[in-house]
Image (tube, coloured by chain):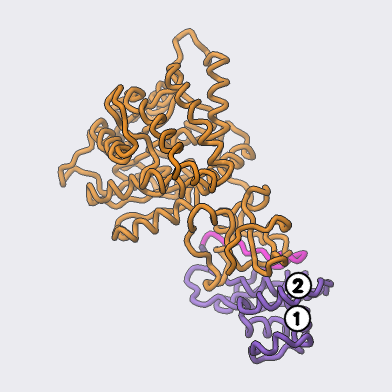
Chain colours: A purple, B orange
Amino acid sequence: MRLLTHNMLSSNIKGVANGFPLLIEVEKVIEKQVDFNPDFLKNIFPKIEWQALVQASRSMGYSELPEESPESSMLDSDDFLMKFHHVLLELHLEEGALVCPETGRKFPVNKGIPNMLLHEDEV
Amino acid sequence: MKESPRCDSCTRFTVCTHRSDFFILSGRKKEKRLSDIQSEMSACLRPSLLPAPPPAPTWRSSLLFGVSSFSRKLITRASSTTSTTTMSDAAARELKEGIAEFYDESSSLWEDIWGDHMHHGFYEPDSSVSVSDHRAAQVRMIEETLRFAGVSEDPTKRPKNVVDVGCGIGGSSRYLAKKFGAKCQGITLSPVQAQRANALAAARGLADKVSFQVGDALQQPFPDGQFDLVWSMESGEHMPDKSKFVSELARVTAPAGTIIIVTWCHRDLAPSEESLQPWEQELLKKICDAYYLPAWCSTADYVKLLQSLSLEDIKAEDWSQNVAPFWPAVIHSALTWKGFTSLLRTGLKTIKGALAMPLMIEGYQKNLIKFAIITCRKPR
């Protein structure tokens, strides 16, 4: 599961007011190489919740992403874009869990696939 | 966001790196269906990403949507249902998905041309019909149906809780809510329709009385005996297990409540007949393919099912003569410039359905297809 995915997911358990972002419990992280595409990164940037991405990258063991949300000028810097690219697309959570920030409920991640199925009483 | 719909090189949930946007492709590529994606994903997406209500036909097959790329899949749906059907579970599931997709694709066009209601109009036999009359005819169908079923308009006796099984975009529900002041709940397999139905209800100030959800008529998401009027207007033909369909209708009916089924059937079999003639079966099969219909049954079969559940006051009538002008009227509307161009902008499923219309006419003319109404009451 890429951090791009993680950035989109939220815990929608019944009664939970704010299920985003999910906390990450890491068991196994792998790195996969992905072709660098600056246009894509520039377009996807506005859709990303930056703080959530930074926090997530830290839990995955990467600390080089700037904490403050970058200004648009940063998007022209290749240096920045490469870090953004790495965090967003190349870091994968293979095994672990996503944790609901309110209830602590864990959504397991196995073989890179998060299981977001809610139980009957959570719907 | 850019306007163009699909990327032909990407598949499934994918980031289209050609356009640097996200596209989810339609079922055209036999990957995830839009409706599947919408319902699965919305269950776990952060609120700021939830999709907007479905727009006009050209866009329906693509949705600008923030989604994971290359994450293969998210497990958001438990595997197969437990409904007991005479079809294999896999076939039943495929049928349900086909139905949902068909209506997801066609609903907008139909609404555009025909309005609220997705059922036949009721006409005097042999009347010639103008396309401008069709909406009034569809309302007449509802009124005649209520009359046949003996539903009272008396404020002390009229229905208060209605379920619309196979509700489409909610035309019947909204009509009944307005007419009787009743609360109505509708179920449909099509998420696009459910969403649209709710939107229309809200727009008409009926959101406190009518609500719609995605649901399976063979496993209705309601407790026993909840409704005093159980309404199935032209949805029965989609049910692969008529017996389960009817018993669910009966289950959710309150004591003394009324069940109304208006549906397409094939002619009753003669006492000596075991099945329809081969040519009849062939014609029905072609229609089934186009409209995502499972095997047909006869009006008599429905009556037998209702009898087996000890329901009372069972009445059935053949209204084929009263709907005969309907299909020519539909074809007429399709052949107008607006109809034609709109059709071109929907999708293959809708077009296939449109091309099958003459088959329906043939079926009626050859006395094979019957438009039937069957009603009954649950004992006190």
Mark 2 belongs to chain: A
Apparent side of residue B184 relative to residue B147 in the rendered image (left or right) = right
Alpha-carbon neighbours of circle 1 within 10 Å: few (<14), some, or many (≥20)? Answer: many
| Residue B104: percent from left, percent from top | 51, 49
Q: Mark 1 points at which residue?
A: A60
| Residue A10: percent from left, percent from top | 58, 72
**Point 71% across, 73% down: residue:** A40
**Point 40% across, 41% down: residue:** B118
Look at the numbered discs 1 and 2 and tell me whether their residues touch, using CB distance below 8 Å: yes
**Point 38% across, 45% down: residue:** B224
Of callouts 1 and 2, the N-terminal one: 1
**Which range of residues does the magenta coloring cover?**
A108-122
What label does residue A93 carry, if any?
Answer: 2
Apparent side of residue B264 relative to residue B22 in the rendered image (left or right) = left
| A112 in the magenta segment | yes
Element type at mark 2: strand
Taking A93 as reference, is B35 above or below it? above
